[in-house]
Image (spheres, rainbow, N blue to C red):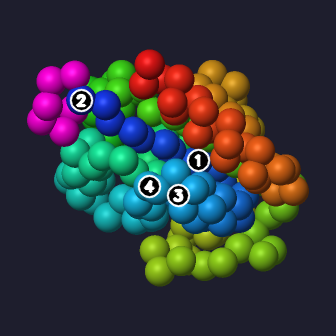
Amino acid sequence: FNGQPGAIRKMIVIEGMDNSGKSTLAVQMAEYMELIVQESEGPPKSDKEINARVDRYEKMTDRLFVRHPCISNAIYGQVRAEGNPITDGRTMLFYDARPTLIYCDAGQRGLGSHVEKAHDTKKHLKDIEDNYNKLLYLYRQWAAEHAHFVYRIGDDVEQLIATVYFYEQYKKA
């Protein structure tokens, strides 16, 4: 990756439903680990746009992603009429890159204290409200298969960050 044979590429992805603490965790973790935060850019604007976004993310190094389209679109696509437009090959390349995956479990928080982002369309928020339990189940199922770490609001953030930091050091060795 990043054009150099054998180069180490650090990619950490924080995933989870809206209002699960992803952005708050990302800011603290990125500061400690000296990473750049790549915030979610929201639902796909088109099939072409979301696949181009995945391609652009693939070239980014030393990043902490607040959501990655290869994960979130696979989950949210199960409740959206348009489905998941990301090609299987792109998803395979994403997982083959072995990013560190952190799942933020929203529990039954709902969207009550959700901080709306510029990309939060009314349709997106309605999809979440209408399918909250299904999305929570799908995310938990994904996490059981893929996540390296699980975070819930109220967990010891400093302990999680230190653990992820040492895990990243171990991966380099």
Q: Secondary structure at mark 1?
A: strand
Q: Secondary structure at mark 4?
A: loop
Q: Which residues are magenta?
A: 1-6
Q: Are marks 3 and 2 in contact (CB under 8 Å)?
A: no
Mark-to-mark CA distance, 4 and 2: 17 Å
Q: Is residue 117 left or right of 50 when viewed as pictured?
A: right
Q: Amino acid at mark 1?
A: Glu
Q: Secondary structure at mark 2?
A: loop
**Residue denoted by label 4:** 35
Q: Amino acid at mark 3?
A: Ala
Q: Are marks 1 and 3 in contact (CB under 8 Å)?
A: no
Is any atom of residue 29 visible in this view? yes
The dot on residue 15 is 1
Q: Secondary structure at mark 3?
A: helix
The crowding category of the residue bearing disc 2, from other C-alpha atoms within 10 Å (few below 14, some 14 to 19, many at least 20), is: few
Mark-to-mark CA distance, 1 and 4: 17 Å
Residue 165: x percent and y percent?
A: 58, 39
Q: Amino acid at mark 2?
A: Ala
As drawn, the residue found furthest toward the top would be 173
Where residue 90 sits, quadrant-wise, is top left
Quadrant in the picture for the N terminus? top left
**Magenta stretch prevailing secondary structure:** loop
**Residue denoted by label 2:** 7
Residue 5: x percent and y percent?
A: 15, 24
Residue 105: x percent and y percent?
A: 75, 47
The crowding category of the residue bearing disc 3, from other C-alpha atoms within 10 Å (few below 14, some 14 to 19, many at least 20), is: some
Residue at the image position 75 percent from the left and 69 percent from the top:
111
Q: Are marks 3 and 4 in contact (CB under 8 Å)?
A: yes
Residue 4 part of the magenta-drawn span: yes
Residue depth check, mark 1 versus mark 3: number of the one nearer the observer: 3
The dot on residue 30 is 3
